[in-house]
Image (cartoon, helix red, strand yellow):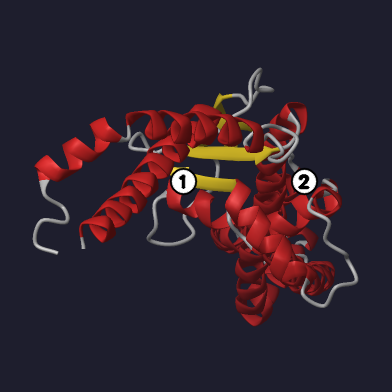
């Protein structure tokens, strides 16, 4: 066996069996060309798209591109694709099969991929039996991605809206109660605004006393208001402060609610399409020349091993 793979022996064998190698090569080329044809291997077409993430917001420490990949590769998007395109029919998979999803996910992952490029875009690659459908599938992945992000954002905004609505209702009740109490006190005491009336009423009452009009009807009215300020002024002042504070809080909550409601209701996209998918004009799989080449090399190599073994046995 020492000289079994000797170079001189191999070159001699090749020259000696050159016609046999030619025949083997021709047969390998013809057979591989036939069996790699559409009759035996169904051709597939490739469609690609490149997209940038946008309007996603901060969800985690991952980059926005990585977040986009997480959504695109989620089972929710994959299931939407399986519902929208009859892939199971082309791959002869029965929906009633207990392992239907296992088979479908395996096929999906083999023929559809999403990856991050060096420029932080996400590249989508779809392989399918029909060029038009491959392009439509690319578009649909982007659509379902936008839809999924939109749903996620609406869920979070919806939770915020529920909390804000409860706070608004509670603050509105507080405001109504303060409004009622303040109006009732104003009617009973005549105190419209404690802060502005205190100095004015005090000044007027002192002037009336200084002018010797203590018994005058006007002075009596001022004295009544002055007494009301002494007795109920503090309560009116406290309720006024709470009332205006409630108004400011109510305005702030309404503004915040309106902003979140606008965010909840708006329809926007969450991706910038840099490269739109289009139907391929030639198949991407199988690559027939590659199959023919490797078949030729494999056949010639196997023939050489066989001839080496035969010649070695003859020598023995």
Q: How crowded is mark 1: few (under 14 residues within 10 Å), some or many (20 or more)?
A: some
The image shows residue 37 at horizontal and vertical percentages of 67, 32
> In this view of the protein, which residue sits in the foreground, 128 or 146?
128
The image shows residue 200 at horizontal and vertical percentages of 58, 55
Q: Give the mark nearer the N terminus: 2 vs 1.
A: 1
| Up-down relation of residue 209 to residue 178 (above or below) | above
CA gap between label 2 and label 1 equals: 31 Å
**From where the camera sits, is residue 213 visible?**
no
Which image quarter holds the C terminus?
bottom left
> In this view of the protein, which residue sits in the foreground, 290 or 199?
290
Which of the labelled discs sits on residue 265, or is there none? 2
**Residue at which label 1 appears:** 115
Dividing the picture into quadrants, the one containing residue 61 is bottom left
**From where the camera sits, is residue 282 visible?**
yes
The image shows residue 1 at horizontal and vertical percentages of 14, 64
* 203 sits to left or right of 86: left
Mark 2, secondary structure of its residue: helix
* 220 sits to left or right of 301: right
Which residue does the image show at 74% across and 33% down from the upper left?
Answer: 136
Residue situated furthest right in the rendering = 96
The image shows residue 162 at horizontal and vertical percentages of 75, 68
Mark 1, secondary structure of its residue: strand
């Amino acid at each position: 066996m020492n000289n079994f793979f000797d170079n001189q022996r191999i070159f001699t064998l090749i020259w000696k069996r050159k016609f046999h190698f030619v025949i083997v090569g021709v047969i390998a080329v013809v057979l591989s060309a036939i069996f790699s044809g559409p009759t035996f291997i169904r051709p597939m077409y490739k469609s690609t798209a490149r997209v940038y993430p946008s309007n996603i917001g901060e969800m985690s420490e991952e980059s926005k591109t990585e977040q986009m990949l997480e959504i695109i590769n989620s089972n929710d998007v994959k299931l939407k694709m399986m519902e929208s395109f009859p892939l199971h029919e082309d791959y002869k998979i029965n929906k009633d099969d207990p392992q239907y999803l296992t088979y479908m996910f395996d096929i999906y992952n083999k023929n559809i991929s999403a990856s991050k490029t060096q420029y932080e875009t996400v590249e989508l690659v779809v392989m399918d039996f029909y060029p038009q459908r491959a392009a439509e599938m690319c578009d649909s992945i982007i659509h379902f991605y936008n839809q999924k992000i939109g749903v996620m954002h609406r869920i979070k905004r919806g939770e915020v809206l529920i909390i804000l609505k409860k706070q608004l209702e509670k603050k509105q009740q507080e405001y109504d109660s303060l409004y009622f109490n303040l109006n009732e006190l104003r009617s009973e005491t005549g105190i419209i605004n404690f802060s502005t009336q205190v100095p004015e009423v005090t000044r007027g009452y002192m002037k009336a006393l200084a002018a010797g009009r203590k018994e005058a009807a006007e002075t009596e009215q001022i004295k009544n208001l002055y007494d009301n300020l002494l007795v109920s002024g503090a309560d009116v002042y406290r309720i006024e402060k709470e009332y205006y504070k409630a108004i400011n809080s109510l305005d702030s909550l309404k503004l915040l609610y309106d902003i979140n409601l606008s965010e909840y209701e708006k329809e926007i996209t969450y991706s910038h399409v840099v490269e739109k998918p289009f139907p391929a004009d030639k198949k991407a799989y199988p690559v027939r020349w590659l199959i023919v080449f490797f078949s030729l090399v494999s056949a010639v190599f196997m023939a050489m091993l066989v001839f080496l073994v035969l010649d070695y046995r003859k020598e023995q």
